[in-house]
């Protein structure tokens, strides 16, 4: 999905932000912790993560976004309960394969929060890492936090996007894009969705409050905001080409938390 770029570049660094774990290489060692469950009348591969059940995207051929190959081997939850998403080249087929999970539970108004481990500011220009809710109706009913340069090496990496509610034809999506510099590889990202506004935040380190915020954006009415309850998606995929550096990519999601509006 091509975002409408707002070409703002920034370098933000907070010296007092530290992670609870030193930086270092991440070992890509899959765990056999998947199950098979009937979801919407279909047998699907599922995992348990952060107290929710998630289906793993495992089509037999290419599928969107952007006509990629997807593999269940690129998704696993480790012994600490952290979710791993990987893009890598298959040893036998030579195909680059992506990763996606979708919650079986829909979510409505409230705060959606992710705690992420990985250098999301330094992803290859052809990589997309997405955190969002989505009805499945293309170009409608979606609130995105995406990390991608969309194939352009100098485009801003952080993208906040709101797609209009189904039925609001003639209304475009709204997007805010920004570059940033990380302290370490731990970040927190969230959006709060209400009937009249969407409020996005990104913060250094793992936060449940507002300490070390480095980016934020709010859209309020008359922006079109979906009223639907929708599943959450987390994916890691290729934008029209393999990684330009030829390297596999891994992102670790330590936690997803949803807090409904009180």
Image: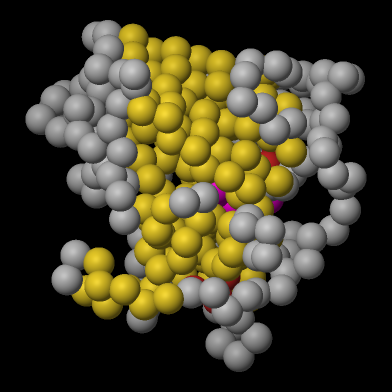
Left or right, residue 110 beside residue 99: left
Looking at the image, which residue is at 58% across and 45% down? 255
Left or right, residue 58 beside residue 235: left
Q: Nearer the viewer, residue 143 or 256?
A: 256
Q: Position of residue 254 (x, y in %)?
A: 63, 48
Left or right, residue 97 beside residue 153: left
Decide whether residue 128 is among the magenta residues.
yes
Q: Nearer the viewer, residue 95 or 29?
A: 29
- Asked whether residue 132 is in view, the answer is yes
Q: Position of residue 82 (x, y in %)?
A: 63, 56
Which quadrant would residue 36 be assigned to in this image?
bottom left
Left or right, residue 207 beside residue 219: right
Image position of 101 with respect to 255: above or below:
below
Image position of 144 with respect to 197: above or below:
below
Region in magenta: 124-129
Looking at the image, which residue is at 33% across and 10% down? 220
């Amino acid at each position: 999905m091509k975002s409408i770029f707002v070409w703002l570049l920034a370098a933000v660094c907070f010296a007092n932000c530290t992670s609870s774990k030193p930086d270092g290489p991440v070992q890509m060692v899959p765990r056999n912790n998947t199950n098979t469950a009937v979801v919407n009348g279909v047998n699907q591969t599922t995992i348990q993560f952060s107290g929710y059940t998630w289906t793993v995207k495992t089509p037999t051929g290419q599928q969107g976004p952007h006509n990629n190959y997807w593999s269940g081997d690129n998704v696993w939850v480790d012994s600490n309960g952290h979710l791993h998403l990987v893009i890598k080249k298959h040893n036998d087929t030579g195909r680059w394969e992506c990763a996606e999970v979708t919650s079986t539970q829909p979510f409505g108004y409230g705060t959606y929060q992710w705690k992420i481990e990985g250098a999301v500011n330094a992803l290859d220009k052809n990589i997309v890492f997405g955190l969002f809710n989505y009805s499945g109706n293309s170009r409608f009913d979606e609130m995105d936090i995406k990390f991608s340069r969309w194939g352009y090496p100098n485009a801003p990496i952080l993208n906040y996007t709101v797609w209009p509610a189904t039925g609001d034809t003639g209304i475009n999506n709204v997007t805010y894009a920004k570059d940033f510099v990380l302290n370490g590889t731990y970040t927190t990202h969230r959006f709060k969705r209400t009937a009249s506004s969407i409020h996005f935040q990104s913060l250094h380190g793992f936060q449940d409050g507002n300490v070390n915020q480095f980016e934020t954006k709010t859209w309020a009415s008359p922006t079109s905001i979906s009223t639907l309850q929708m599943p959450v998606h987390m994916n890691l995929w290729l934008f029209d080409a393999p990684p330009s550096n030829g390297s596999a990519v891994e992102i670790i999601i330590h936690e997803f938390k949803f807090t409904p509006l009180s």
